[in-house]
Structure formats: structure tokens, C-alpha cells
Image (spheres, rainbow, N blue to C red):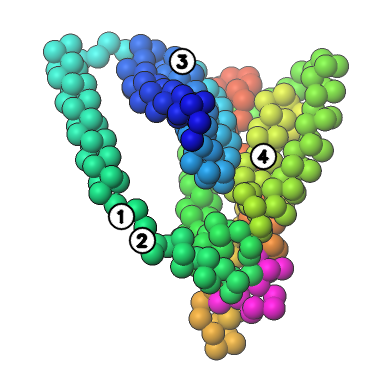
Amino acid sequence: MTAVDWLLDGVLAVLLPLVAWGVVTAASLDKAIMLFIALGFVSALAWARLDAIDVALVEAAVGSGLTGALLLSALPSIEPLARRPSSVAPRVRLTVRAGSLALLTGLAVWLGATILRLPARSRGLTELVREHIAQSGALHPITAVLLDFRGYDTLLEVAVLLVAALAVRAVQRRRPEPRREPISELLAAFLHLLVPASIVLAGFLVWEGSHAPGGAFQAGTILAGCGVTLQLTGALPVLRMSLRVRAALVLGLVVFVVLASVPVVRGHDLLDYPRPWAGPLIFALELALTISIAVILVMFFPSPPSGPEPGARGTDPS
């Protein structure tokens, strides 16, 4: 490692705990959200320095981008609650913060000591994945792990995402369709570039995921970010539970269950893809997951407020 590498890693090592501490100790919610978004980008840089490009892409897109936008959209609703005076004494709050800091410091020291005690050379999961990657149908080890070797976890993650999106939409208050305001020519030109660029980038990430960093989660997040931007500008109506939206929501999970179950009918193990078709089947699965993940993430964003609040006179509270 060069001096520049040591300097960059040292700056990231100092920034991560400082920004994280700023998130939990921020004086206001808006500052906490801004610091949270910054923490996501710093974390993405740290994962990139560890050569975990897949994790870095997800952290930047989901952990910082979409999650930050979701927190900003929820800020007007939760900020009045945060402004209420706290009933906890200042001395108690100080004690809790000091105890939390001591606990986190002890945890960091324990993790560091554990990592330093690890043997320099050992036969771990990396070697096992490399030995069996040819049987998975994918050339990239992370894709092989997520969709073949550890396919059960990914299947459950997709199911959890779907249930979470449906639960969020069920508890959201239904609002009338907001009136669309005319947008500027500059914004319209940006949107005309954003949509095709997002589709091309998402397709590239899906294709690249078979042999390089990328895949369905990264591609779906790119499409979701495009969809959220279109909704915020009024260029895309709020997603309703139409037949097409429902089909897109369950597409990834249904394709995953079918591809996982067909080998059982043929007398093989669950998720044991037919070897000659393993690569194309994984690619088709990633395409279906990309569509479902994009729609699921867009469903987390509530419709913009317009007109009187639900429950007011002349509105439908359902």
C-alpha cells in the first residue's frame, strides 16, 4: 500500500465513527437525515476500498440514496412529534449517551482484537466458492452465492421486501391524486435523459452481475430511483394496486419459487438448477427480480399531499 492508500483509509476510518456519532447526536431531524445520507456515502467508499463493489453499490443506492429520500419525504410528518419537549432529564440523557459510547467502544475493541487473532492463511468460504463456482452457472462469486449456494436467504429476502411494501401501502393514508403542475423545460429535458439512461444502466448492471459486480438489487435500485424522481416531479402518477403493479410486485418471487421448485419435480435438490441452463436461468431470474425490486422500493414512497387531509369533509378516508 502506498502513502496515499494509508491516508485515504485513515480518513475513512476516522470519518465513519464521527459521522455515525453525529447522526445519533444531531440537534434536529433534518441535520440527522443529512448526516445519515453522508454516512451512507462514506460507508460506500469504505466498502469500495475493501473491494466489495457489490456492497458499495447497494450502500450508495439503497442505504444512502433511496433511504435518505424516504426519510426526507417522512420529515414533515414526524418533525412536529420530535419538537415536543422531552420528559427525560438531561442527566439521564447524558448517562445513556456515555454508556452507549462506552459499549460501542468496547465492541469495537473486541472486534478488532478478534480480527487480529485470525490466522493469516486459512481455508475459508472464499476458496470453497471458487472451487464450486463452475457448478452454479454464474461467473461472479457473489452472484453464485446469492442465487445458488445461498439461494434460500435471497428468496426469503425478496419475500420480506414484498411483505414490507404491502404493509407500508396498507397503513399509508390514501390521498387523492395530486394535481400535476407544469415543469420547467430544463427539468423536462433532464427527465428525458434520466429515463433511458436509468434503463440502460440497470440492464448493464443485470448483465454485468453474472461475471462482475452488479445484479438485480443494484439494477432495481437504479430503476426505483428513477421512478421516485418521476413521482416527485409529477411526471409519473402514484402507483396504485392495479393488475400490472401487482404482477410486477410478485414477478420476482414467483419466478424464484418456480425455478427453485422445478428441480425437485425432476428428482434433484431445491435450487439445483440444470447445469446446461443454469446461466440463462439465473439471468432470467435476475431480470424478474430487478422489476419486482424496483416496483417494491417505489411502493415505499407515499403519495404527495394534495388537497384536504383524509377524514376531512368531502374526502374518502379509505
Please tell me which of labels 4 and 3 falls first in the chain.
3
Which is the main secondary structure of the residues drawn in magenta? helix
Number of the front mark, 3 or 1:
1
Amino acid type shown at disc 1: Pro
User: What residue did someone put label 2 on?
Assistant: 122
Residue 23 visible in the displayed image: no
Alpha carbons under labels 3 and 2: distance apart: 46 Å
Label 1 sits on residue: 119
Mark 2 secondary-structure assignment = loop
First along the sequence among labels 2 and 4: 2
Q: Could you classify mark 3 by the number of other residues whose Cα lies within 10 Å: few (under 14), some (14-19), or many (20 or more)? A: some
Q: Residue at x 59, y 19 (%)?
A: 308
Question: Where is residue 47 drawn, in percent x and y?
Answer: 49, 39
Q: Nearer the viewer, mark 2 or mark 4?
A: 2
Q: Which residue is mark 3?
A: 30
Q: Which mark is residue 222?
A: 4
User: At which x and y percent is residue 168?
Assistant: 50, 41
Do the numbered discs 2 and 4 sit on residues whose CB atoms are within 8 Å? Answer: no
The reply to whether the C-beta atoms of the residues labelled 2 and 1 are less than 8 Å apart is yes
Alpha carbon of mark 4 to alpha carbon of mark 1: how far? 39 Å
User: Residue 184 appears at what percent x and percent y?
Assistant: 82, 15
Q: Disc 2 and disc 4: Cα gap in Å?
A: 37 Å
